[in-house]
Amino acid sequence: MRLGIALLVTTGIAGSALRAQPPTFEVATVKVNRTGSGDSRFPELRNGTLAAESVSLKSLLQAAYGFSRQRITGPSWLDSDRFDLTGKAPQGVPDSELMQMLQSLLKDRFQLKVHRETKEMPVFEMFVAKDGPKISTYDPEHPLEMPADIGGSVIKGVATMSQLAERISPVAGRPVLDKTGLKGRYAFILIFTPVSAQASDSGAPDFFAAMHQQLGLKLESMREPIEILVVDHAERVPSEN
């Protein structure tokens, strides 16, 4: 009787450990992109497949770990070399687990080793403007329509405020931290003149003015310690698929 109980307990522990293992892609390919076309597709999910085309390893790290480019440091080729990636998720795996699956895939194919540390650096803190937010709560039944005459650069999507902060960080030129206190997901279309092209005659407001006018959000310059992702090691050529 005691042996039977012990076997049940052991089996239960083994089963729990097995269930605790994170899911992996059923099929995944990672290869160096040699087209040199310059066109790229940031990692996106469609019908259970995560795909990216002609993207840097830094872009893949952005998607996998949720850090903006300014918060990822490592070898210079992280920005220059380009890769294609496709991963088919198992049936029934929620989207929330896909980024952990991508982390595992990068560790396996690039022999990736990373760590996190805190570093003080210039940032923008994102607040709700005094006249209130103008950004729309996401409603799948009423998607936002792109204006016919854009006249500037565009950032469009559906995101939480923290995801929006990460999304606009490259445009702002430094990490953006969400201090809005707004919860939930929001749909947005931001049309602006990039910071690097203020002399443009596109007619669109500059980036900071557009944030205020179109989304009801403001950015304030600060300097504070933030978490960064440090790449300790990565193979320049991914292992075989």
Image (cartoon, rainbow, N blue to C red):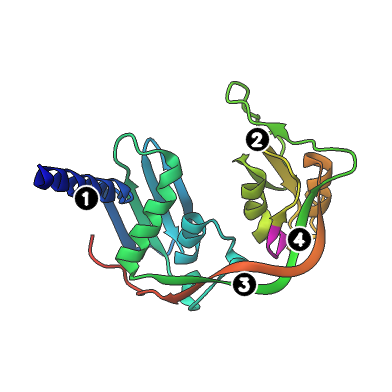
Instruction: State the CA–CA distance, disc 4 to disc 1.
Output: 47 Å
Cα separation between marks 4 and 3: 16 Å
Q: Is residue 204 visible?
A: no
Q: Which residue is mark 2?
A: 187
* Viewer-nearest residue: 11 or 173: 11
Residue drawn at x 24%, y 49% as measured from the top left:
13
Tell me which numbered mark, 2 or 4, is placed earlier along the sequence.
Answer: 4
In the displayed orientation, state which residue is furthest to the front. Answer: 1
Looking at the image, tell me whether mark 2 or mark 3 is earlier in sequence order: 3
Magenta region, residue range: 172-176
| Front of the two marks 4 and 3 | 3
CA gap between label 3 and label 1 equals 37 Å
Q: CA distance from mark 2 to mark 1?
A: 44 Å
Q: Amino acid at mark 3?
A: Thr
Please give the name of the residue rendered at 79% of the width and 40% of the height, measured from the top-left corner: 214
Say few, some or many: other residues with alpha carbon within 10 Å of mark 2 (under 14 / 14 to 19 / 20 or more).
some
Report the amino acid beneath label 4.
Phe
Residue type marked 2: Ala
Query: Mark 4 highlights which residue?
Result: 124
Residue in front for this viewpoint, 65 or 216: 65
The crowd level at tag 4 (other Cα within 10 Å; few <14, some 14-19, many 20+) is many
Tell me the quarter of the picture where residue 68 sits.
Answer: bottom right
In this rendering, position of residue 107 left or right of residue 224: left
* Residue, disc 1: 14
The C terminus lies in quadrant: bottom left
Membership of 174 in magenta stretch: yes
Relative image position of residue 220 (x, y in whole percent)? 82, 58
| Residue 187 highlighted magenta (yes or no) | no
